[in-house]
Image (tube, rainbow, N blue to C red):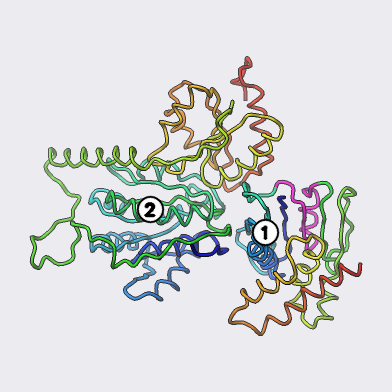
Amino acid sequence: MSEKVLMRGTHVIGEAAIRAGCRFYAGYPITPQNELTEYMAAQMARYPGRVFIQAESELSAINMVIGASMAGARAMTSSSSPGISLKQEGISYLAGQELPAVIVNTVRGGPGLGNIAPTQGDYFQATRGGGHGDYRTIVLAPYSGQELADLTVKAFEYADRYRNPVMILADGMMGQMMEPVVLPEPIDPVTLPKGDYILDGAKGRPSRLVKSLYLDPPVMEEHNWKLFRKYQQIAREITTWEDFMIEDAKLVIVAYGTCARIAKGAIRRLREMDLKVGMLRPITLYPFPSKPMKELTLKVKSFLVIELSTGQMLEDVRLAVEGRAKVHFYGRPGGVVPTPDEIAKHTNLIYHRQGLEGEDYE
Amino acid sequence: MTKKMIFAGFGGQGVLMMGYLLALSAMRDGKNVTYLPAYGAEVRGGTANCTVVVSDEEIYSPVASSPDYVVVMNKPSLKKYEGTIAPGGILFINSSLVDIEPNRTDIQALKIPVNELAKEVGSDRAINMIMLGAFVEKTGLTSLDSLEASLRYVTKGKEKFMEINKKGLIKGSEFVKRS
C-alpha cells in the first residue's frame, strides 16, 4: 500500500484518473475546477501515449471525449455547472451510442453564471439526464478525499462495464479541501481489455458502427428498452450508500457529498446529547438507494433531507419512502455552507417535535 | 482529541501556507487532518482564510462552528472570528498590524509582533512562519522538527527559501517560550 499524501480534491481526481488508465482528457477552464485541468495538463504529458487537450469550448471537449471513447481510450472531461450544461448534448450522445466516459462536475452556485461557491444545485441535471432523450447517467457523490480517489477509479470501471457515461458530482468544497489520501495502484492502459465495439480500423474483421440514429421507430423502441434494461441491471449491481448510526435511530438524516460530511459532525453533537439520530448517505445518486430507504421506514418514521439547494434529492427520498414516513427538509442554496452547529440545532428541533400535533408547522 | 482552527488574514500574508504546513506536519505525525481553504475571488490584499482540523479520530466536519484556536493576521479577521472561538480557546494576534484589543475574557489572547520579529530574522516574508512557530509552540499540535521536515518537502526545488522560513519558525517558537 502506498503512503498517505495530502492533496486537494481536484488533484486527487486527476491523479486517480491517470492511475485508472485515463488516456485522454479534454477540458475547458472554469472555476472552481481549474486545478483539475491544470493538473492534467502537467501530468498527462509525463506519460507516453496520453493526451491532454485544452479545447476551444466545452462543446468541443465533450465531443473529443466521444471520439476518444469510440477509439477505445479511457476518456474524461471536467467542468463546473455552466460548462456541464454545455456538455449535455454530448452526454446524451454518449448514452445513445453506449460509449463509456467520465465527466466530473465540480458544482458551483447557479442558475446561470451563479457564483463559484459550493452548492448541490445540479442534482436534478445530473440524475435526470440533463440532456435530451430517454437515458440515465451513473452519478457518484464522493464525500472525502479518499472517496474522490476510489470513486474516480470506480467511475472508469463502471463506464467500461456498462458502456455508459459516469458523472462524478463534487462541489467547490470537495474540490478545494485537502485530506490524507492513499492513491490507487496505477493501471497501465495497455493492459485494459479492448471493447468489442471500438473503432480502431476494420482490417481483418467486419466493420463496426457506433451511432445513436435509429430512424425506424420499432428499432429505436428496442434500443430504448435495451438501455432501460441496462439501467435496471446497473441499479441492481452498483447501488451504494453508507449507513451511519442508524441501528437505534429515531430520525434519519439523508445527505450526500459535502453536506453529509457536515451532517456527520452534527450527528456527533446530537449523540452526545443522547438524541438517536443517524444518517443514510447515498454514494450513488443514480442509481438512488431507494430500497434501503424504503426498508428503513419499517422502523424510522422521520427523515430529514439536508442539501445545499432548495430541495432536489428531497424528491427522490419522498419517492423512496412512498409516504410511509415523514420527510423534512433543510437546505442552504447559493453557496452558503452550514456549520455542524446549525444543522444540529435544526435537527434537534425536528427531533423533539416528532409525533406532536402541528408537526407540519415549520 | 479533535482540535479545529482557523488561520485568517490578508491575501499575500501566507495564511494558506500556514494552514497547509500545519496540516501536512500533523498528517506526517500520524494524525487525521483536513485543510479547507476559503475559496472565492481571492486577490493579494483581499481576505484569505483556511480551516484546519487535527484529530486522533475520524474527522467528520471539515467546517468549524467554534474553533479551538484562531490566528488573526489583520484587523478585519479579528472582528470576524473573535466571536466564534470556543470558550477556553486561544486567539493568536499579529500585534504588528492589529492595534485593537479583543473583547472576549473567556479565551486566552496571545500577541505576537510578527513584523518586528521578521526584521530580526531578516525577511518580511517570514511573518507566516514566525506565527506558525509561535502557534505550534503554544498548542503542541505538532513539533518544530516535524514542521521543518514538512517545510523541506514543500520547498523541494526551491531550497533557497528553506533557511529563512526555518529561521522564522524558530523565532516564533522562541518568542512564545520567553513570554
Secondary structure of the residue carrying numbered label 2: helix
- Three-letter amino acid code at the position of disc 2: Ala
Answer whether residue A31 is visible to the viewer in this image: no
Q: Position of residue B149 (x, y in %)?
A: 67, 73
What subunit carries mark 2? A
In the drawing, does residue A23 fall left or right of residue A356?
left
Q: Nearer the viewer, residue B131 or A330?
A: B131
What subunit carries mark 1? B
Total numbered labels placed on residues in the image: 2
Give residue A314's mark.
none
- Report the magenta residues as a range: B65-86
Location of mark 2 (residue): A155
In the drawing, does residue A45 fall left or right of residue B39?
left
Q: Nearer the viewer, residue A75 or A333?
A: A75
In the drawing, does residue A244 fall left or right of residue A75?
right
Question: Extreme front residue here?
Answer: A1
- Three-letter amino acid code at the position of disc 1: Cys
- Vertical order, B116 against A336 (above or below): below
> Disc 2 and disc 1: Cα gap in Å?
30 Å
Q: Nearer the viewer, mark 2 or mark 1?
A: 2
Check if residue B69 falls in the magenta segment.
yes
Query: In the rendered image, which quarter is residue A136 located in?
Result: top left
Location of mark 1 (residue): B50
Are the numbered discs 2 and 1 placed on the same chain, yes or no?
no
Q: Are marks 2 and 1 in contact (CB under 8 Å)?
A: no
Q: Position of residue B49 (x, y in %)?
A: 69, 60
Callout 2 environment at 10 Å: few (<14), some (14 to 19), or many (20+)?
many
